Amino acid sequence: MINHQNISYLFDFLKKDKNLGNISLKITSKGIKKVKNNLKSDIVIKNNSIIFNVKIDSILRQSCEILLPIIQKKDRNFIGQIGQSLDAKIALNNGNSHYINEKESITYLHCLRSISDGILVGVNTIIKDNPLLTTRKIKGQNPIRLVIDPSLKLTNKYKIFKDKNTNIVFTNSNKKKNLNNTTIVKLPKNNFTLGIYKFLKKSSLKYILIEGGPTTLSYFIELKLINYLQFIISPTLIGSGIDSVKLKPITNLNKAIRRPSNFAKLGKEIVATLDFNS
């Protein structure tokens, strides 16, 4: 059986294995191993398809199917992700966002976090939501938390500074601060977002998840710094609220961003993935 306690074994294996074209796998109490006989395998991977011969929760299965094509690329990837309503709202005007998406989508998000080496958010996400940014819905490796805080507003009162997980805070401020379990990286104000991108490209972090908010995500989209962009779309109409992206206005639809796309079912919701690699 594959469940929330051992699904991370599969993700870790898929990230590390160099050839995912056609393999058969067995899941054990210690992890995943290759087997030669498909009849004795728990998991069979053929190109972009993943087949489970054991019992698995439907959301975990769908999560694997969505994430497999991304993991198979084996390149350094920046993945933008945002959960929204059908009319592209991530919160009400008063900031309330709990919960636009279904709880199953939170499980998927934690699977996405578990394949990520770092998770990037803007300072307003920390201040407004005070998130943990962990993989607590599944048993998996927590990514390094990466926070964009230009004026260094954060203090140790937030949750990310109260556990033992690693943080990196990017700033262009000259303030002197001591934030728990955190490395503060000062970068020039000019081309700040590009500077963060170049820093991360040189780091050992391979998969970077850009989780929010809309301003941070939009900067990366406009500067063409992402490889994939995912929208988890709830069949909900809000009518007014905070938009999921904040791109600069265009005057001609020829300038609209159009990329190869894939749509996958996730419980009652849809995950739309745009591929920016081409």
Image (cartoon, rainbow, N blue to C red):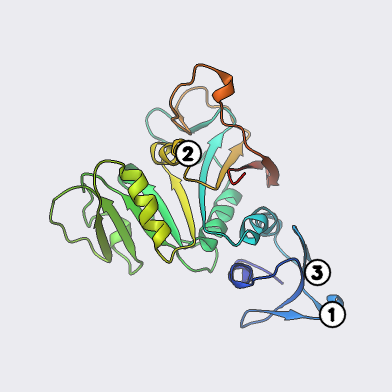
First along the sequence among labels 2 and 1 = 1
First along the sequence among labels 2 and 3 = 3
First along the sequence among labels 1 and 3 = 1
Residue at the far right in the pictured view: 39
Residue tagged 2: 221
Counting other residues with Cα less than 10 Å from the Cα at mark 3, is it few (<14), some (14-19), or many (20 or more)?
some
Q: Give the residue type at disc 1.
A: Asn
Residue tagged 1: 37
Residue sitting at x 36%, y 67%? 165
Residue tagged 3: 53
- In percent of width and height, residue 31 lies at 62, 79
- In percent of width and height, residue 36 lies at 81, 81
Q: Is residue 187 above or below residue 39?
A: above
CB of mark 2 within 8 Å of CB of mark 1?
no
Counting other residues with Cα less than 10 Å from the Cα at mark 2, is it few (<14), some (14-19), or many (20 or more)?
many
Residue closest to the eye, 131 or 202: 202
Which of discs 1 and 3 lies nearer the camera? The answer is 1
Q: Write down the quadrant of residue 34 in the picture.
A: bottom right
Q: Give the residue type at disc 2.
A: Ile
Q: Is residue 129 visible?
A: no
Residue sitting at x 70%, y 45%? 264
- In percent of width and height, residue 120 lies at 40, 52
Q: Give the residue type at disc 3.
A: Asn
